[in-house]
Amino acid sequence: MSDAGVAFDEVGDENLPRKHTVLELGLGLNLVEDEDGQRGLDGVATVVPEMYVPGTTALCMSVMAMWTDLLAGVLCGFFLEPRVPVTLDLAVDFVRPPVDLTEVHGTARMIKTGRQVLNVGLEYTVNGETLAIGTAGFMPVPDASLTLPHTSTAIVEHHTGEGRLSKPYFERVGIARRSPGVSTLAKTAATTNASNTINGGLVVAAVEDAVLSTAAPGEVMGSLLLRYLRPLRVGPAVARATRVGDTARVEVTDEGSDDRLGILATTRLIRL
């Protein structure tokens, strides 16, 4: 499971959300309500070259996944607070190649709220045309004593969209490639979340890097499905990708916790 609470960086006022890698992805959030008073979240982000798949002008799937985890997780926070929402599953599909983008708009709307599981639908557009669609499932963290350190309203207000990556995304996150098909993400102050586990959204960068290390030039991730099985508590998170044609299966394990399986992912590669 991935904790969707606010992530923290090495410095900052303990009473406020602190600067974190996620904020550098520049997604500004805005709470909206429909005619029936149903809450939703809108987001907008400027696409910069540091978000590109290396050697291309295509937006990284892992950036889209992080935006999806943030939009859906914060929206679920309004329904669950003060409980901490954790991600059960997440999917993103590009409906066209994600190239030459300048600004991406996202919407997150609740599809269904059950007693234990909440389901969110998302859409991303560019100039009014659909770029990608996504879904995400969340539940409250089983430990009821864990609560969000900030209200959902404060989190929305903190995500102004003013952040910008200072270096390429994989480098900023701290992805290390061990061998073709194997990439890692260490547990650091910049990669943990409110439950002191590795941020499941950031782990997607290791998943993508592992898959891309097996890809031919011009191949990028066009779809992604993640299943979160258990928190990655110790680290490093190790992503191992196995290719079958244009698809890949990725297993992410917690190496410092007896290499226990934490995330399962499947993805499809497309050619630009």
Image (tube, rainbow, N blue to C red):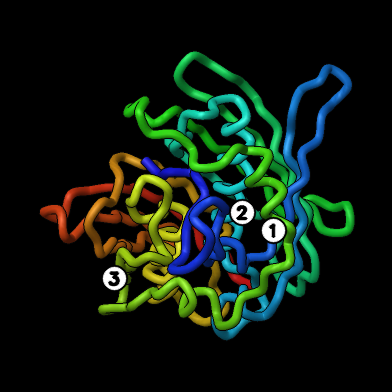
Q: Position of residue 267 (x, y in %)?
A: 46, 55
Quick check: 189 above or below 35? Answer: below
- Camera-side residue of 72 and 24: 24
- What amino acid type should be assigned to the residue bearing mark 3? Val
Q: Earlier in the sequence, mark 1 or mark 3?
A: 1
Quarter-of-image position of residue 185:
bottom left
Name the residue furthest top: 115
Q: Position of residue 30 (x, y in %)?
A: 77, 45
User: What label sits on residue 151 in the rendered view?
Assistant: none
Q: CA distance from mark 2 to mark 1?
A: 7 Å
- Camera-side residue of 206 and 249: 206
User: What label sits on residue 182 in the rendered view?
Assistant: 3
Q: Secondary structure at mark 1?
A: loop
Tell me which residue sits at (45%, 19%) in the image: 116
Instruction: Confirm or deny contact between disc 2 and disc 1 (CB under 8 A).
Output: yes
Q: Position of residue 265 (x, y in %)?
A: 39, 50
